[in-house]
Amino acid sequence: MSRRNFTPLGLNGTSLGMVALADAATDGLDRAVRAFLSSLEHERRMSPLTVRGYGGDLAELLSFVRETRPEVREPSGIDLAILRSFLGRLAKGRKPSTMARKMAAVRSLFRFLLKRRQLEKNPAAGLALPKVRRKLPVVLNVDAAAQVMAAPQGDAPDMLRDRAILELFYSSGLRLSELVGLDLTSLDLALDSPEVRVIGKGSKERRAPRASEPTGALARYLSEGRQSLWEMAKRPAPTAAVFLSRRGRRISVRSVELLVKKYGALGAGRSDVVPHALRHTCATHMLEGGADLRAIQELLGHASLSTTQRYTHVSMDRILTVYDEAHPLARKVAR
């Protein structure tokens, strides 16, 4: 089946990804994928971007099945052999990380169907996934982080905005989508309990602390920069967004990615600084400063502590220091 035969699947008006539809009427495979994507959106409350990603990956599976095994119309007809053949096709010109992501979507689909008792066994349970080498996360040291924060120079409205964005990433450990989605009502500007309310993954709200100085970058942007951006854009209607573009609209994800990369190069001389690197740096510096993993888990909004453990990076010096201080058999020697 060619790509032009893919049809957008919409539920309640929301596009959930490109899913291959049967030529005449939807069959059991289509219905299973529709139900799964609906569950992701409405029950697990995943972001639209994540749901679209799952939809696109599963569209490839449905297209492969209809091309190679057109007689298979129900999920029960898919067996391990079909999935292995699908994995073999994915291996042609695909990175292991891409293959692993697509197969993770397939495995999630069959776990969903098994849980709903629409299958007696999970055909993906015996599927061996490609090994993916995890890259070490980018972590800035304290001096480099400070240099990135100070990289936007001058008092122009967009410079005030950029300093506020960098400070908020580093001080609060926000995700990129969380920062872009901030509204004015999300901010508590009281100095006794400065915080931001963000909507994280699964549409879960949490509160994150932020830098509290009354002359800090965020406070100055809100008092001087934001209104100037709005007035220069001459927008007819107000927006609730905290961070505005030069056109007076909510700043885009891509714009924030580019400005973080630019200031990473200007301030720290690094081309690999992305928003997630600042989030990771925030967590790492807290850990090295004595915060426990549970506190960092709450800060970052992780559902699982194991996720926090993957995000945090502790230097060997820190590990050895803690060992010397805590373990009764440690050799108490001066370093």
Image: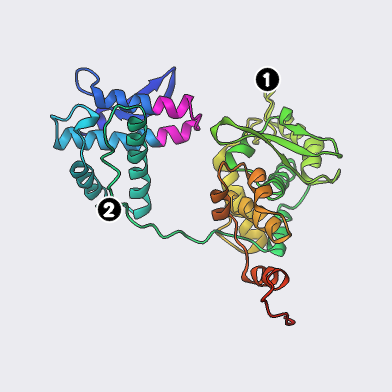
Q: Disc 2 marks which amino acid?
A: Gly
Looking at the image, do the residues carrying marks 2 and 1 touch, with CB atoms under 8 Å apart? no
Specify start and end residues of the magenta stretch as a single range: 37-53
* Secondary structure that dominates the magenta span: helix
Residue 16, given in percent of the width and then of the height, sits at 41, 27
Q: Position of residue 98 (x, y in %)?
A: 36, 49
**How far separated are the C-alphas under marks 2 and 1?**
48 Å
329 w.r.t. 74: above or below: below
**Nearer-the-camera pick, 328 or 131:** 328
Residue at 72% across, 46% down:
159
Using the rendered view, name the quadrant where residue 243 is placed: top right
Q: Which kind of residue does numbered mark 1 sit on?
A: Ala
Q: Quadrant of residue 281?
A: bottom right
- Say whether residue 265 is left or right of residue 216: left
Residue at the disc numbered 2: 93
Per the rendering, the mark at residue 237 is 1
Asked if 102 appears above or below 139 in the picture, the reply is above
Horizontal arrangement in the rendering, residue 252 relative to residue 331 (left or right): left
Classify the position of the C terminus by image quarter. Answer: bottom right
Label 1 secondary element: loop
Q: Is residue 148 visible?
A: no
Q: Which of the 4 image quadrants contains residue 184?
A: top right
Q: Earlier in the sequence, mark 2 or mark 1?
A: 2
Residue 15 in picture, x, y percent from top left? 42, 25
Colour convention of the picture: rainbow
The front one of 100 and 121 is 121
